[in-house]
């Protein structure tokens, strides 16, 4: 085997693997986020904790979701939802963690880095109680199913 073979073998072995394909859009919602590898959830009811991103498409929180570690963490641990502020004018531009009873599990966060987001997400996963007892009724510019956690009012005290 000559030097040309080893050169070609080295060149082929040094290439980055191709990017995975983008995930499909959420069911019942347009794909507002520009983060292609997050499996954004639609508005079907879920028992998983919601990670609700309220941001403009391409905004700082949306850009955070582009990080491979953030996308993997979201896909593995949460039911992520991306909403532009116009659809949820009562919610802050932040990431909100909401459980299946409609309880806020952590104060809203605006993490400055992927590691700060993952730290907040880990706190949420370890916390067993809500941090805020009730949501005020939220005005929606979209039709949210009645049994969805975004429509429920947290009953915990």
Image: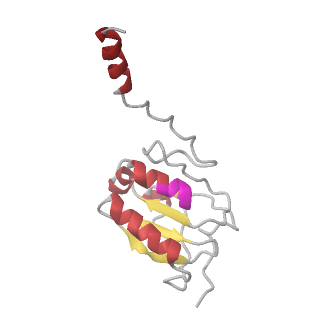
Name the image colouring: secondary structure
The span shown in magenta is 73-80
Q: Which quarter of the image is occupied by the N terminus?
A: top left
Residue 148 in magenta? no
Q: Residue at x 44, y 34 (%)?
A: 19
Find residue 16 and report its image quarter.
Answer: top left
Magenta portion: prevailing SS class: helix
Image x and y of residue 41, in percent? 58, 53
Q: Is residue 17 above or below residue 70?
A: above
Task: Residue 107: give x, y in percent of width and height.
Answer: 42, 77
Q: Is residue 108 left or right of residue 43?
A: left
For residue 150, say whether it is visible: yes
User: Which residue is outermost to the bottom?
Assistant: 157
What is the quadrant of residue 10 in the picture?
top left
Q: Is residue 149 above or below residue 132?
A: above
Left or right: residue 91 versus residue 26 is left
Residue 92 seen in render? no
- Residue at image position (61%, 87%) is 156
Where's residue 75, x and y in %? Answer: 53, 54
Q: In terms of depth relative to the viewer, which is nearer, 102 or 71?
A: 71
Q: Nearer the viewer, residue 9 or 129?
A: 9
- How many numbered discs, if any? 0
Q: Residue 29: image x %, image y %?
A: 58, 49
Say whether residue 100 is left or right of residue 134.
Answer: right
Quadrant of the rendering where the C terminus is positioned: bottom right
Q: Which residue is most to the front? A: 1
Q: Nearer the viewer, residue 76 or 107?
A: 76
Classify residue 142 as left or right of residue 67: right
Residue at (50% x, 37% y) in the render: 22
Front-lying residue, 2 or 133: 2
Q: Is-magenta flag for residue 77?
A: yes
């Amino acid at each position: 085997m000559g030097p040309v073979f080893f050169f070609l073998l080295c060149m082929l072995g040094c290439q980055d693997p191709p990017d995975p394909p983008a995930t499909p859009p959420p069911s019942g919602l347009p794909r507002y986020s520009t983060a292609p590898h997050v499996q954004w959830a639609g508005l079907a009811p879920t028992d998983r904790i919601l990670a609700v991103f309220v941001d403009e498409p391409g905004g700082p929180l949306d850009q955070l979701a582009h990080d491979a570690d953030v996308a993997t963490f979201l896909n593995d641990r949460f039911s992520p939802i991306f909403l532009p502020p116009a659809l949820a004018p009562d919610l802050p531009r932040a990431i909100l963690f909401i459980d299946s009873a409609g309880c806020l599990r952590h104060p809203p966060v605006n993490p400055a880095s992927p590691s700060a987001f993952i730290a907040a997400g880990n706190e949420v996963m370890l916390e067993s109680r809500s941090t805020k007892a009730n949501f005020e009724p939220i005005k929606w510019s979209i039709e949210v199913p009645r049994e969805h956690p975004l429509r429920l009012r947290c009953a915990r005290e």
